[in-house]
Image (cartoon, rainbow, N blue to C red):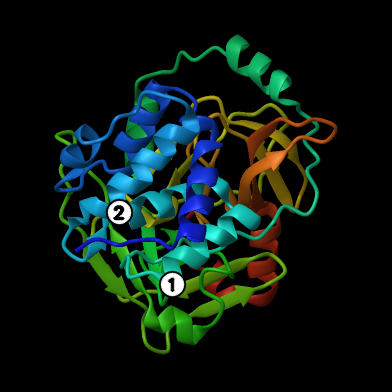
Amino acid sequence: MSVSLAAEDFERVVAILATMPDFRTAQQRADLLTDVFAGTPRGDDVITSLDLDGTPRAVAVRVVQRLQLFGQDEPGREALGVLLNKMLSYLGGGGSAQVLRSVLVRYPLATPPAVDDTGIGEWRGGDTPSGTAEKIIGENTLRDIFVLELALDAARAVVRVLAPGWVGTGFMVSPRLLVTNHHVLPDRAVAAASSYTFNHQVDRARRARPAEVAGARAEGLFHTDERLDLTVVELETPSAAFQPLVMRARRAGRGQRVTIIQHPGGHYKKISMQNNFVAYADDRVVQYTTSTEPGSSGSPVFDQDFEVIGVHHAGGLLSTPGSTERQLRNEGISTVAILADLARNAPEIAAQLAR
C-alpha cells in the first residue's frame, strides 16, 4: 500500500523537512533517516533506496516522494508516517508541528502522532546558539564507565505511553506508579484506555527487543495537576524487571549537565546525554538546551547521578530573541514542585515513591 499526499500537503511537508537543522548535509540526512528507521524490519531497504545528495529542498522532495511509494516499513505502518512523526518530535510545538499533526490524522498512515507539547511560556536561559556552542566545545566529556551502568539501569524504568490517538513517555517511581504529563494522560478515562510498553527499544544488534505491555489498574491510585502538567497513575503490576527511579527535591544549577531518556515520537527508546546543559532553574521549572533531539512529553530529566530532577513537558526548535537563528530548547517541571504537590495533595502516592 502507498499513500499519496495532496499537492498542498506535499509542499508543506517538503518545506518543513528541507528547513530542519539535521537536513542540511548528506551525512546529516543519512544520520537522521538511520535514526528514524532504526530497528524496523525494512529500515535498511528504506535508507538505501534514497538519494541524499543535493540541495535540502531537492532532497526533501525526493525523500517524501520515495516514502509515499515505498509503502509500509512494517505491517500496518507507512514509512512516510514514521518520518512525519519523527519530524514532529523534533519540532515540539508551533505551526509546523500542527501541519504535520494534521497530515498524520487525515491520511491512513497508521502512526499515532506524538502528543502535542505544551509551549514554553518564557525562555529564561539567555543563551544564544553561539554561547551554547562554546559550552559544548569547552566541555570535559570524560566520564567514569559506571555512568553507563547507571544509564542502563535507569532506562529500564522508562515506558512508552500509547494513549488513544497520541503517544508520550512515562517512568516508574515505584513498582506500580508511573509519572508522565497531564497533557499525555489528562484524566482517569484516558489512563484506563492507554497501554504502557516496557523495553520498546533495539538491542546491540539493532533488533527490536521483546516488549512487555501493562495497563492501568482498575480503581488504582491516580493524581493529576494541570498547572504542573503532571499525572501519576497506578499500573497493574508490570512483568518487566526495573528499578524504580528516585525523584529528588533538588533544584538544578545553571550549567549543570542533564540526561534525558525518552521515546521521541513514540519510537524506540533513546538517550540524550551529551552537551545538554541547564540554562535556567527555579523551584518550578528546569530549562535546558540540547544539541540533539528533544525528549518526548513525560520523559525523566536526570542529574549526573541519574536521579530525576524534572519531568520534560515542553520544547522544540525555538527562535532566539533578537536573532534569526533557532535552537532546540526544552523545559521540564522541577521535582521540587512535583514532590511538594504530591505531599500536599496526594499523600498516599507520596508515601510510595522510591527513596
| Residue at 51%, 79% in the rendered image | 222
Residue bearing the label numbered 1 = 106
- Return the residue found at the far right: 322
Could you tell me the amino acid type at mark 2? Answer: Gln
Image marks 1 and 2: residues in contact by CB distance under 8 Å:
no
| Residue at 64%, 65% in the rendered image | 229
Find the distance from the CA under tag 1 to the CA under tag 2: 15 Å
On the image, the x and y values in percent for residue 207 come to 15, 43
Residue nearest the observer in this picture, 73 or 282: 73
| Residue at 16%, 40% in the rendered image | 45
On the image, the x and y values in percent for residue 238 come to 27, 67
User: Mark 1 vs mark 2: which is more N-terminal?
Assistant: 2
Q: Circle 1 sits in a helix, a strand or a loop, which is it?
A: helix
Q: Look at the image and tell me whether residue 167 can be seen.
A: no
Horizontally, is 64 left or right of 44 in the view? Answer: right
Q: Residues within 10 Å of mark 2 (few under 14, many from 20)?
A: many
Q: Quadrant of residue 166?
A: bottom left
| Residue at 56%, 70% in the rendered image | 231
Residue nearest the observer in this picture, 280 or 132: 132
On the image, the x and y values in percent for residue 33 come to 33, 37
Residue bearing the label numbered 2 = 68
Horizontally, is 344 left or right of 17 in the view? Answer: right
Q: Residues within 10 Å of mark 1 (few under 14, many from 20)?
A: few
Q: Nearer the viewer, mark 1 or mark 2?
A: 2
Placement of 46 over or under 215, stated as above or below: above
Q: Circle 2 sits in a helix, a strand or a loop, which is it?
A: helix
On the image, the x and y values in percent for residue 236 come to 31, 76
Residue nearest the observer in this picture, 55 or 221: 55
Residue nearest the observer in this picture, 196 or 354: 196
Q: Quadrant of the N terminus?
A: bottom left
Could you tell me the amino acid type at mark 1? Answer: Arg
